[in-house]
Image: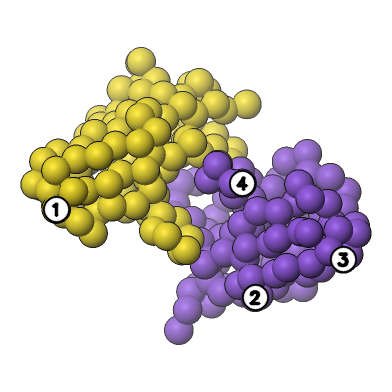
Amino acid sequence: DTAVSQTPKYLVTQMGNDKSIKCEQNLGHDTMYWYKQDSKKFLKIMFSYNNKELIINETVPNRFSPKSPDKAHLNLHINSLELGDSAVYFCASSPGTSGVGEQFFGPGTRLTVL
Amino acid sequence: GENVEQHPSTLSVQEGDSAVIKCTYSDSASNYFPWYKQELGKGPQLIIDIRSNVGEKKDQRIAVTLNKTAKHFSLHITETQPEDSAVYFCAAKDYKLSFGAGTTVTVRA
């Protein structure tokens, strides 16, 4: 009965490859997010989707393309991986966008680019 | 955009003592201030939050204070226990959540 789940938990790949991370939430939330946590543990939002529509794109390179097939899923596809993409990527969800409310985070996907 | 600064970056306390983490924010439009706890290998988890129309909130051993005029808010943990050891993040929300850099708290037994 995991609230926000991500797969895979670990991802090790070579520079230049393309990879995807999947996220699913069973909380019935309307909004989902992708965050990047770097090696210094700094957390920064990348994207936010509300009911399958992109509402926040924080100047992320075009190599990153989120896709939301339905409001319970938000996947992240990364093309032409670079060394600097190595980080932990967290998916999160929340009930709404404009108001206040808890964001529930997934367990994270640790991406290592060699 | 919003800029959140968090201090200290590391904090070591004796079990049973109190821990205080302080944050400042820049955008007066921010109206929601959550605190997250992140344990090793896990995602951040909300421990307490405060809205802009409230000055203080308490939940058992955890309390948060907000000074909107000065644009700062603080987390207070009393009677610390070893399981309080983790990384704590403050955040402020205008149209998105902006996080502080985190405080690594170590509770010494």
Q: How many marks?
A: 4
Q: Chain of mark 4?
A: A
**Kind of residue at disc 4:** Asp
Picture residue at 46% right of the left edge, 26% below the top: B5
**Kind of residue at disc 2:** Thr
Nearest the viewer among A110 and A1 is: A110
Picture residue at 39% right of the left edge, 58% below the top: B39
Residue located beneath label 2 in the image: A7
User: Of circles 1 and 3, which is in front?
Assistant: 1
Separation of residues labelled 2 and 3 (CA atoms): 15 Å
Estimate how packed mark 4 is, as few (under 14), some (14 to 19) or many (20 or more) residues with alpha carbons within 10 Å.
some
Which of the image's four quarters has the C terminus of chain A? bottom right
Q: Which chain is tinted yellow? A: B
Outermost residue toward the top?
B70
Ranked by sequence position, the earlier of labels 4 and 3 is 3
Residue located beneath label 3 in the image: A18
**Kind of residue at disc 3:** Asp
Q: Which chain is tinted purple? A: A
Q: Secondary structure at mark 4?
A: loop
Separation of residues labelled 2 and 1 (CA atoms): 36 Å
